[in-house]
Amino acid sequence: MVSVPLSPPRGMDDILPDEMPLHRRLLETVRQLFRLYGYREVETPTVEYFELFAVKSGEDILGHMYVFKDAHGRQLVLRPEMTAPIARLVAGKLSRSPLPIRLGYIADCYRLDEPQWGRRRRFYHGGFEIFGSSHASADAEGLLIFDDFMKRAGVSEYTFKIGHVGVHRAIMSSIGIESEDQDRVLALMDRGRTEEAEKMVRQLSKSQEGAMLFSEVANHKPGPALETLTDIKEIVAGNERALGEAQNLQEILSLATSAVDPSILVYHPGFARGLSYYTGFIFEVYGRHADVALGGGGRYDGLVSTVGGPNIPGVGFAIGLTRVMQYLLDKMAVKVDHDSALVYVVPLSDDAVGEAFKVATQFRRAGASTEFEPSVCSAVEAIRRAERRGARFLAMLGRREIERKVVSVRDLERRVQEEWVFEEVYEKAKTLLKGIRVST
Ligand code: AMP
């Protein structure tokens, strides 16, 4: 016998039968939103080339990737996120698609993060990306979809943390700071190391006035999105490009508030996100009961060209489905439906096994999910087993039923029992199903 650990690798989770219905419900919600908002779903391999993430993913992701070599020495990774693989598709196989192109995905991603609540080494992203539009409506759409998702998923209290790295980048560009250095400054801000970011800007800057402007924006306190944005617009009024970026955020927010409650939009002028491909609007979503993001995204206009495609703008986001599931279970104590068959078919004697097997088939042909019990037991035991499995109906056949060519069908919820003749099982099962659909 080989001795292997009975748990999955550290930080990774099996999804067990009792957890699957909620996991599946969240995935189905994401797919409903793909259809509702016009996103076409795609799938890419779990394994990607290292280089795809090497250029633009940011230190936080690069330092936490599962990296390995294939038999030919090519460096491969388990994908840490999906925006870069989707950009690869748009740069390659989908490069002739009419723009804008909306793509959706549901994918497991892998990061060598230190496992803790809400932080796993394997987790699901449900994502939405739009390529080929620079318009503010494409950015605003992300807020609408995420808001819709939260409502459908049953997360009642949440806020959007809004930012715009275009404002920071514009200020830094105007004082001569190159794009790669900007990425490093924004990465520091993302980790809350704003003072170090400011110091770096001061060192790299050609104008102390510009560095001060950067600091003023980075340290401005968060607040209701539209009011705070008015403050920022006044602060950057003398810098035309930065003002233009702030104006872009204004347009995004105006469009978003046509559908999203403005009171849940909070602008954090000092907010940056870990991935260095962001160029403009960014956001994250927080539930009231946990200080970790349930998802996030933003605009990444240079990414498609970085992976070898044309210069196509892009914007999108990912919902952290694994974290949302943990949030619903642990912080909101949601009740989870269980996967159980509607009908449980049990033979009560050895000579009834064949007939019971056929009865199970009749139920299934009528559309009822049906589980067959292969071992013979008493009626009392059959009821016990069916209840433990959460079935609604129990179909039993013993010697008595076989002689009379009937099956005893018990409604375990209403505690009533009737006999159906064999030939009628299919029709009666159909009627039964209709009744259930009407009553639920
Ligand atoms: P990111 O683009 O890295 O911010 O990821 C988007 C979302 O995925 C985050 O807001 C989280 O909800 C989720 N996420 C990121 N990393 C992890 C992780 N290690 N475990 C679980 N969820 C994660």
Image: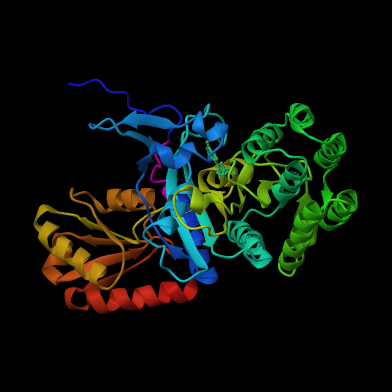
**Span of residues in magenta:** 13-20
Q: Is residue 169 left or right of residue 45?
A: right
Does residue 324 belong to the magenta stretch? no
Write the residue at 51% across / 54% down: 127
Q: Position of residue 242 (x, y in %)?
A: 79, 51
Q: Position of residue 101 (x, y in %)?
A: 49, 66
Q: Quadrant of residue 186?
A: top right
User: Measuring 75% from the left and 49% from the top, which residue is drawn there?
Assistant: 167
Q: How is the image coloured?
A: rainbow
Q: Name above or below for residue 169 compared with residue 72.
A: below
Could you say where residue 411 lies in the image, as x and y percent from the top left? 37, 64
Q: Residue 190: give x, y in percent of width and height.
A: 68, 36
Up the image or down, 267 lies above or below 189; here it is below
Nearer to us in this view, 180 or 277? 180
Q: Do we see residue 162 in this rendering?
A: no
Quarter of the image for residue 68 reads top left
Q: Name above or below for residue 271 compared with residue 259.
A: above
Using the rendered image of the protein, determine whether residue 176 is visible from the camera's viewpoint: yes
Q: Is residue 19 left or right of residue 334?
A: left
